[in-house]
């Protein structure tokens, strides 16, 4: 079983933004100290480094904030009526009805797994078959994928059809039974008829 994340996307966003701010303040303080100690050569170099750090940390903080905001918007967005949950609480939002998502997951599960030592050709063939299944069942619909989220993040789901395997449900049964996910969404098992 995959390890579940302990922290919510909100916590991670706030932590990353705070960490970026602290890192920038350290470099900005070093630049000010450089100007006070030896105005031109050291201060100018440290100011350039602080500017680079500001740009880098700014991009990182904004990207992480957008990543988290996109997840919470999708949780309430009616344009994504279906969600699939995988092992480790990976989440994929689909802009299609649950029946199409279930068909895609069933056909994908029917693909034989790769052998322990596989060739590039075997991997490419399996990828090609998976792409064919995706094109046939999902078409060009919009999807959003999150590799792993905290169980508290899933409580934000509202008005969705959650497609998952029976094994995933049994693994996280206590979470589903004691959280609002089951009450505010409908559950559909992709392997129910297997």
Image (tube, grey):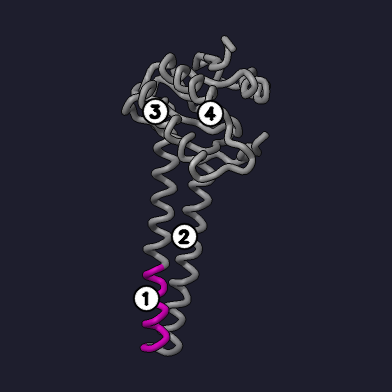
Instruction: Give the SS element for disc 4.
Output: helix
- Number of numbered markers: 4
Earlier residue among tags 4 and 1: 1
Earlier residue among tags 3 and 1: 1
Q: Which residue is mark 4?
A: 154
Q: In this orientation, which residue lies closer to the viewer: 125 or 181? A: 125
Earlier residue among tags 3 and 4: 3
Span shown in magenta: 40-52
Q: Which residue is mark 3?
A: 132
Front position among marks 3 and 1: 3
Q: Are marks 4 and 1 in contact (CB under 8 Å)?
A: no
Q: In this orientation, which residue lies closer to the viewer: 158 or 127? A: 127
Q: Pinpoint residue 146: horizontal percent, then vertical percent.
A: 48, 37
Q: State left or right for residue 60 relative to residue 171.
A: left
Alpha carbon distance from label 4 to label 1: 42 Å
**In which image quadrant can residue 165 be found?**
top right
Instruction: Give the SS element for disc 1.
Output: helix
Q: Which residue is mark 1?
A: 48
Q: Are marks 3 and 2 in contact (CB under 8 Å)?
A: no
Q: Quadrant of the C terminus?
A: top right
Q: Pinpoint residue 135: horizontal percent, then vertical percent.
A: 36, 27
Alpha carbon distance from label 3 to label 1: 50 Å
Q: Which residue is mark 2?
A: 21
Q: Residue at x 33, y 25 (%)?
A: 139
């Amino acid at each position: 079983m995959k390890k579940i994340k302990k922290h919510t996307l909100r916590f991670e966003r706030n932590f990353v933004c705070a960490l970026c701010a602290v890192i920038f303040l350290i470099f900005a303080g070093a630049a000010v100290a450089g100007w006070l100690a030896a105005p031109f050569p050291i201060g100018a170099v440290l100011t350039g480094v602080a500017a680079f750090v500001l740009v880098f940390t700014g991009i990182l903080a904004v990207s992480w904030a957008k990543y988290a905001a996109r997840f919470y918007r999708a949780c309430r967005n009616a344009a994504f009526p279906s969600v699939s949950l995988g092992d480790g609480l990976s989440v994929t939002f689909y802009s299609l009805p649950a029946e199409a998502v279930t068909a895609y997951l069933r056909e994908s599960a029917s693909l034989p797994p790769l052998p322990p030592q596989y060739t590039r050709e075997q991997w490419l063939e399996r990828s090609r078959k998976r792409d064919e299944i995706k094109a046939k069942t999902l078409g060009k619909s919009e999807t959003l994928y999150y590799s792993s989220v905290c169980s508290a993040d899933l409580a934000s789901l509202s008005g969705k059809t959650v497609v998952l395997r029976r094994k995933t449900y049994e693994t996280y049964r206590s979470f589903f039974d004691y959280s609002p996910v089951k009450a505010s969404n409908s559950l559909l098992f992709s392997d129910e008829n297997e």
